[in-house]
Image: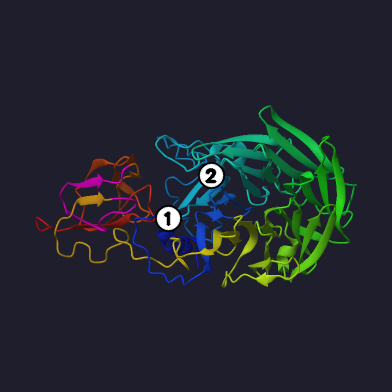
Amino acid sequence: MSKRLLILACAAAIITAACSDIPEGEVVTGEGPRFVVSVADSNDDVGLGNSVAVDPDGNPVFSYLILPAELEPGEIPATRPIGAPYIQTETTPATDDDPAVPGDFGAAIGVGSVSADGIFTRGAAAQVRDTPTGITIPYGPATVDSLVGATADSTNGTDIAIDTAGAKHVVWAGTDGIYYGLGGQTSFTVEQVYDYGYALRKAGPIGRPDVTTDAEDNPWVSYALDGQAQRIEVAIGSEGGWTTETAAQLQPCTECPQPKRTQIGVTSAGPTVAYIDDGQDAVMIAVRGADGIWTTSTVASGVEADGLSMAVDPDGNGLLAFYEGDGVKLAAQDGTQWTVTDVATVDLGDAAQGTGNFAPTTGVAVDEQGVRYVAFMNAGSVQLVSSADGSTYEAVETGNLGAAAFPALAVTPDAAGIFVTWYDDEGQLLKLGIHADLQDLQIANPSPTPEVSGGGAAEDCGVDGAVVLDLVTPAGTVFDTNCLVAPAGEGFTINYDNQAAGITHNVDAFTEQGGESLGATDLEPGVVQQELSLGPLEEGSYYFQCDAHPTTMYGTLAVVKAKKGK
């Protein structure tokens, strides 16, 4: 299936979750907890380097890379909706002497969330250009120049942590270093906490970073660097700025792979960084004592590990999940001792050789009762298991997830919500699975196409010749009709009444879907009345939409030999 067709299908599938005022598809959720899969984002190539956390209200918040879609020859990219994060710099306008020059492409650092009633918000922490005046992108992304030209190959993952106040801490490995973004609901600020010195074409020397917060909500960022010998660094943020400490120095290793993912958490022993030492075939930790000195110790030896993830249990003990050979392992801390147990047998296939954004990942989490959860890749898909006793793991029923890779995992303390994000590498999509009691949750399962009034093309629009030029948005993100009718050969005016208080809409008329705009009203929040004067137009079928919500608010503009009156 082409990317464009898939996006259209997925856009329809998530309308129920994204727009609470649109009639929902009829869904039988059954009783008790169930696993529901939704498309978390589908614009362009989204979902590599994903991470997920839980906010203070128990809702999932996730970060991920947004990149230009990889298209088949001759395939036309889908139009990015207004309000989507920017991955292209501003186009140079055409002049009489020179044609327009498209801006450079790059990446954005996406941030999304789902509210308790199933409403998605998709925005960003950072993007390649300033947001134009009059456009709102959720979470107010900062402009980061180093994202221009960034690719899936030259970047290396994201991570997100939510502090006790609900602030979002996002980190990523860019082409030239490690970046940190702090955001709330309206805006992000971004700082570079490590500068590599020049831009990389291929990720590797800078390992995938991780972020956590301490009891005072200060951020701690861990990452691995490659030089004459690999080292594990920790950047610590405070009101006084950033300080960087070396948590561990690895022995030189000429045949070792480039730095792998690190993980950081606050255990009962203090800030703790987990990392893989390929030269010693070991999974290691470094703990920062009260004196500020980092001390290293071995978690598992004689292992060729990958895909490291970390959680901290209610007693302050660390849990580490990782791949080793054809299995998934879990290392559990009890004081100064670590016990490694088998979780599952897996087939990573080609992913076992992946690096950077394409390196295999696991996810591990633990609830307040000590129940452990592990997500991992297997045979081209993703699996989720849990264990109450720490030794026997049972599968959590997820259904067939299809093409799925690079999972991340988060769990609410009471286990009322289990959240898994992953990358659909066939569709270039970010997906979110939620395991919860869904009786009151408005996310459809499995996201059926709802019957939407006010959206879609109307096949019989204008057949009776009656002029229809009044258009209303009564609330939310819907038009009251998907059919407008205008007289051929005469000028006419579309009367648009946006009754949705505080929600930005407009009406834009086109020669056809994806074609040339014939005219548009300004994007304005309701309540507001607007007029769009057009024509005269030749008899035929045209198209209209709201530029802020083009996947849910659109329809047919039929220009006919009119019969006066409705």
| Label 1 with label 2: CB-CB less than 8 Å | no
Q: Mark yes or no: residue 195 visible.
A: no
Question: Looking at this view, is 380 or 510 the one in front?
Answer: 380
Q: Nearer the viewer, residue 514 or 207?
A: 207
Between the C-alphas of marks 1 and 2, the distance is 17 Å
* Residue 19 painted magenta: no
Which residue bears the numbered disc 2? 124
Give the residues in magenta: 475-501
Residue 370 is tagged as: none
Q: Residue at x 32, y 55 (%)?
A: 554
Q: Quadrant of residue 455?
A: bottom left
Please state the horizontal and vertical placement of residue 254, each as a whole percent of the image: 89, 51
Residue 95 on image: x %, y %: 41, 35
Q: Which mark is residue 18?
A: 1
> In the drawing, does residue 444 fall left or right of residue 432?
left
Decide: few, some or many residues near mark 1? Use Cα within 10 Å; few <14, some 14-19, many ≥20. many
Q: Residue 110, position in %: x, y?
A: 55, 47
Q: Classify residue 535 as left or right of residue 385.
A: left
Specify the amino acid type for callout 2.
Ala
Q: Residue at x 35, y 44 (%)?
A: 503
Residue 340 point in image, percent of width and height:
81, 63
Secondary structure at badge 2 equals: strand
Frontmost of labels 1 and 2 is 1
Per the image, is 478 magenta?
A: yes
Q: Amino acid at mark 1?
A: Ala
